Amino acid sequence: MTLQEITAVVGGAVHDAAQDVTVTAPVMFDSRRVEPGGMYVALAGERVDGHDYAAQAIEAGAAAVLASRPVGVPAVVVEDVPAAYGRLARAVVDRLPQTTVIGVTGSVGKTSTKDILAQVLPRWGETVANRASNNNELGLPYTVTRATVDTRYLVLEMGARGIGHVAYLTGIAPPAVSIVTRVGHAHLGEFGSVANIAQAKGEIVEALPAAQDGGLAVLNADDELVAAMASRTNARVLTYGVENPADVRAENVTLDELGRAGFRLVHDGQAAEVRLRLYGLHQASNALAAATVALGLGHPIEAVAEAVSQAEAVSPGRMQVTTRADGVTIINDAYNAAPDAMRAAIRALHTMSGDNKRAVAVLGEMAELGEHATEVHREIGQQVAEIGAGWLVAIGGTNADQYAAGAAGSATAVDRTADVAEAWNMLSDGLRPGDVVLVKASNSAGLLALADKLIEEPGTVTAQA
């Protein structure tokens, strides 16, 4: 798009550039990741003003900057940069009539489901998806601008921290297909209630076209709040379920010795075997969600099962499993932690440690739980004790105390640390060959760095488990 075309979409005016300057690469808000021919989005934050990096972005090859004031280099200047970013992304979507937009949301499982879909759908056409969890009002427009006229599937994870957030994102990229994975307790402190979470997540099915226009809602039959969203859309509905009757089912679910699920994928009188490379029983539901989308798009069940079976963990800190040279296995699930996801990870730790290895739970605090924080953290501590974990390392402040209190009086050894540095020293001295170590917390707790250090420090990594 030329700068003249961009201003027609977003408003504002061109500064220090000709109108026919063309943007040919993605539109990015991080000056360090701008691609030649792209556009840099200058955002004025509380601590850093992106406008200060405009010249650097141009030097790196950006064609122009989207800014709220003149910056002395080629720019489109607008009043509201984030809003203009969203309008620009919508204009890109409108220029991709052959692209099917697939929206993914839910309290837990949406990133893993998105990652599986991003590995399944390329069998049938070029696929673009969010990298990691770029799922908000900045990350989603960036992902959209990575799409081209050759993109057949645009898979967009859509996050929410309040009612109306998903609706806003679907306005940027209206989905033809949507998935809702589960309604849980993530961000409960911000939403106020589980009912409000369900209301917010269901906005994604309300944005779908009617069934006769190609709309498809993929809903989790194992979650009654998600299943109830069928009444909020005129799209075709396909349900998936591991536990409850559904249009697409996972039957005969098993786990191997490393905690990887296998199941029989069943739909419309046909069946195919799936053997996941992903760790944890909860991944069966995520894989089933992705398979349901592919089946709903008309792809054959044998090919879908084969593609799902080959999917691997790709987003950092999402059930990434590595065995060190000294025999310690690290489960890096430290990118984020809602209560339901924490419970699922602890169950995976139990399975992967088996009867012969010591299970070690290294847990940081879960954020945004409001008045429920004390109760939920204590319940998680109790679960760690119930699975027979040998060692719990609770990192952080008051809520970490609740982890320790929940496990108190059990056979689980419990240690408290104030921060990651102290935890590292404790784990360096205390881990022994054969241990299986889960590292999990909300992103704000900073345990991703601890997980990375635990993997790298002892020497050469011998294999992915």
Image: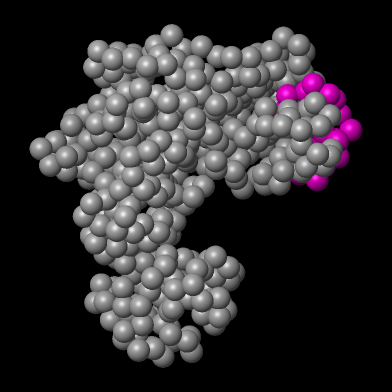
The residue located at (84%, 38%) in the rendering is 458
The residue located at (36%, 57%) in the rendering is 147
Q: Quadrant of the C terminus?
A: top right
Q: Nearer the viewer, residue 297 or 136?
A: 297
x and y percentages locating residue 220 in the rendered image = 34, 25
Q: Nearer the viewer, residue 75 or 195?
A: 75
The residue located at (31%, 86%) in the rendering is 19
The answer to whether residue 305 is seen in the rendering is yes
Residue 383 located left or right of residue 248: right
x and y percentages locating residue 85 in the rendered image = 36, 67
The residue located at (65%, 22%) in the rendering is 349
* Position of 133 relative to 395 (above/below): below
Corner quadrant of residue 277: top right
* Position of 118 relative to 131 (above/below): above
| 429 drawn magenta | yes
* Position of 172 relative to 19 (above/below): above
Corner quadrant of residue 317: top right
Q: How many marks?
A: 0
x and y percentages locating residue 299 in the rendered image = 28, 31
Spot the residue most to the right: 429
Residue stretch rendered in magenta on the structure: 415-437
